[in-house]
Image (tube, coloured by chain):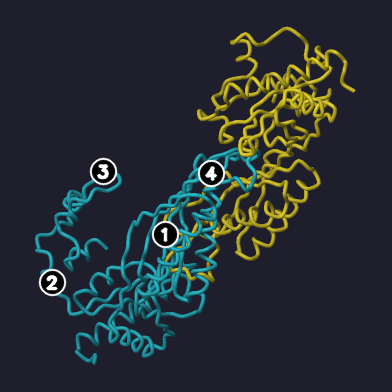
Chain colours: A yellow, B cyan
Amino acid sequence: MMGSLVHVGGLDLEQALNTKGIDGSILGDELQRIGFAGPMPVGTIKPRAYLELHIEQGPVLEAEGISIGAVEDLQGISWQEITINGVANHAGTTPTRLRHDAGLAAARINTFLRDQLASTSASTVATVGSIEFQPNVINVIPSQATLTVDLRDPDEARLKSAEAQLEEYLEKLAQQEAVTISIRRLARFEPVQFDSKLVASIEQAAEQRQLSCRRMTSGAGHDAQMMARICPAAIIFVPSKDGISHNPGEYTDAQSLLQGSSVLLEVVRKLVAGSMA
Amino acid sequence: MMGSLVHVGGLDLEQALNTKGIDGSILGDELQRIGFAGPMPVGTIKPRAYLELHIEQGPVLEAEGISIGAVEDLQGISWQEITINGVANHAGTTPTRLRHDAGLAAARINTFLRDQLASTSASTVATVGSIEFQPNVINVIPSQATLTVDLRDPDEARLKSAEAQLEEYLEKLAQQEAVTISIRRLARFEPVQFDSKLVASIEQAAEQRQLSCRRMTSGAGHDAQMMARICPAAIIFVPSKDGISHNPGEYTDAQSLLQGSSVLLEVVRKLVAGSMA
């Protein structure tokens, strides 16, 4: 979403062009190389509206047998890396009461997120996607555990509340397991509300074409969330098989693609005709 | 403990000599190279008793301010590798109820071991020392988690019970989290009871030298556990700082080393004099 963020003024052009990839390549150089570095000044095009047609990248439409998603908002994202320091010790000779087990503390964070955070809020999702133990051997109590926490919620107040609850829990946990815990914030995006008239127009277009439709939240980030800063924006979702994306298994059948395109066409037609309220 | 296991007939000599190290070296070749491959046939020396003087490799003696441990038994060890298969999916778009989170299931095993197994038995210790997630990235629900479980107990019936409780829990967990779980057994040693007269003799020797002493269980493996198959055996422990071992931080002060040697000398003296009952 770097291009759209630059377009709306959220990121400096030079900074973006100087971005270095993990392979050492420079973004600006690569754009020149592939012929994508155009001459038009940033911000020249002032959109009347921004519509995005996308696969859901999630399992909801497929699971519910619904053809079209009218995306009314986009989750806020909070990414944190948590490091726990305990004491490495012999797995056989160290009594339970004398352990400072960084790996156990990491496990408690994971179950806290599921049992206390995600289960008590209908909208919050929480994921521990990556973890690493030190020294990571079978007969040594882990001295260090590093894990990532991905928290998302379409409501900023609830996302903040989830972050605060986690922080409070970590303080309690450090005491309980006699370990030290530190937090590094990796990324933070506030939730985005899309344009209510555009969302209603997507619903109407689906109805006109006798396609089942539901309002929904985007769990993934999209260019539309950046463009929403300067114009009315919304997203049309079509089902994606098993919710899989960014993976060779990603698949949406031809009929769904046609249905999504048809809804996009109808909303654009109304926008052009000025027939939207 | 390979040498002592060969000596007591628990492992074939040729098999032991052909063992390949992780660096590709062959044990027999290395013994030749360093001059340790002697000509005496295995089993030639028939010990009257076997006594081992060792640092505790655990924190108990230091924590309790006791000078000598009279080791009366040695824990049984059960090592397992558990692999959980779930489904990789987007951390933002996948509702909690539709997740098959292999990482969460791994966390639940760790907390089960602490809260249900180790906390309800005074003698069982349980450790998850190593873990690995796939694909191990911040915004993807782990499709696979592999972890090791180290279970120990000085009582074979209780160790078997712990193994059975874990197996039963894993079946329940697979259902609950909609994942599949497989177990690979890596190692299994039964607990060892040391010779009660030798253990009493260690206690008496400590008392004669006015050294505080307690009976205890060895959590780590030792040659004495192999030698106990062919002769009376026991171990004398001295404190080790913070219980740290196999690590540059391993330390036992000179006074403790002298006290342990002095107890060893006294027990050997009694054995030689035939004054043990």
Residue B24 image label = 3
The foreground one among A107 and B25 is: A107
Closer to the eye: label 2 or 1: 1
**Which mark is nearer the camera, 4 or 2?**
4
Question: Which chain hosts label 2?
Answer: B
Q: Earlier in the sequence, mark 3 or mark 2?
A: 3
Q: Are marks 3 and 1 on the same chain?
A: no
Q: Which mark is residue A139?
A: 1
Q: Same chain for labels 4 and 3? Say yes or no.
A: yes
In the depicted structure, whether residue B52 falls above or below residue A100: below
| Circle nearer the N terminus (4, 3) | 3
Residue B266 image-quadrant placement:
bottom left
Pointer 4 and pointer 3: residues touching (CB < 8 Å)?
Answer: no
Residue B230: % across, % down: 19, 75
A146, above or below B60, in the image? above
The reply to whether label 2 and label 1 mark residues of one chain is no
Type of amino acid at the residue the image marks with label 1: Asn
> Which secondary structure lies at badge 4?
loop
Residue under mark 4: which chain is it in? Answer: B
| Residue where numbered disc 2 is placed | B45
- Residue designated by label 4: B142
Which amino acid, mark 4?
Pro
Amino acid, disc 2: Ile
The alpha-carbon separation of the residues under discs 2 and 1 comes to 33 Å
